[in-house]
Image (tube, helix red, strand yellow):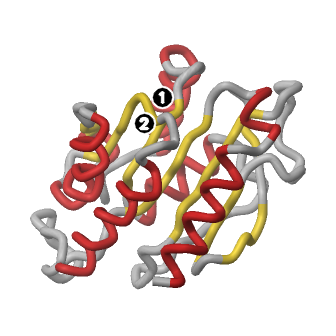
């Protein structure tokens, strides 16, 4: 329960930060919840813990102003986004080109270009996989390479554009949370 409260406080701080008032967009990025089946199979439904994590994500982000939700085309990402999508009455947009292990960095780069062109004023959620989350953070110019271990499901990345539109330099304008601790910050060029 205290873990939920800490995450809620971090998200609340982000939502009411001065940076969000200047930048009218944010991208929340998460990995899908825990799964039942072993790695190596595409059909991996969420475990009970994964379902609970999806419900917690919905509870934490329901008032974040999210206007669009993207997932890979795999069930585990779609089901992780489902509780929030239902609460917000948003139809998640599945992107099969971002399925693991077949995605390419060029697909991630094209997704970033699409976000910048079509959703620059929106607050967006992307639910992906260890590889696609890391690749998306890289494409959005996060200043530190992020590698998510296969055993971690509790990262919430929040990126906001810098007010001056310049590339990220590590100034605190977004949150990177892992195990409920603020580890770093970054911005991206919209």
- Above/below status of 98 relative to 57: above
Q: Is residue 85 left or right of residue 164?
A: left
Residue located 70% across and 55% down the image: 13
* Label 1 SS: helix
Instruction: Locate residue 112: give its quadrant.
Output: top right
**Going 14% across and 69% down the picture, which residue do you hit?**
44
Looking at the image, which residue sits at the far top?
A: 117
- The residue shown at (75%, 61%) is 144
Res 182 quadrant in image = bottom right
Residue 110 relative to residue 80: left or right:
right
Q: Are marks 1 and 2 in contact (CB under 8 Å)?
A: yes
- Where, by quadrant of the figure, is residue 38 drawn? bottom left
- Residue 123 spot, x, y in % from top left: 53, 32
- Density class for disc 1 (Cα within 10 Å; few <14, some 14-19, many ≥20) is few
From the image, tell me which residue sits under label 2.
107
Q: Which residue is mark 1?
A: 110
Secondary structure, mark 2, is helix
Is 178 positioned to the left or the right of 105 in the image?
right
């Amino acid at each position: 329960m205290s873990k939920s409260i800490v995450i809620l406080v971090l998200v609340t701080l982000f939502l009411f930060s001065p940076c969000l008032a200047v930048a009218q967009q944010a991208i929340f990025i998460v990995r899908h919840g825990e799964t039942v089946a072993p790695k190596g199979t595409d059909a991996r439904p969420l475990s009970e813990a994964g379902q609970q994590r999806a419900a917690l994500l919905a509870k934490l982000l329901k008032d974040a102003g999210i206007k669009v939700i993207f997932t890979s085309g795999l069930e585990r990402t779609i089901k992780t986004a489902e509780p929030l999508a239902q609460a917000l009455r948003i139809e998640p947009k599945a992107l099969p080109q971002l399925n693991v292990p077949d995605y390419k960095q060029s697909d991630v780069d094209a997704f970033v270009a699409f976000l910048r062109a079509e959703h620059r004023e929106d607050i967006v959620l992307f639910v992906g996989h260890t590889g696609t989350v890391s690749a998306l953070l890289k494409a959005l110019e996060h200043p530190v390479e992020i590698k998510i271990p296969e055993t971690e499901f509790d990262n919430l990345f929040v990126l906001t554009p810098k007010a001056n539109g310049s590339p990220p330099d590590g100034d605190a304008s977004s949150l990177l949370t892992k195990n409920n601790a603020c580890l770093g910050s970054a911005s991206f060029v919209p």
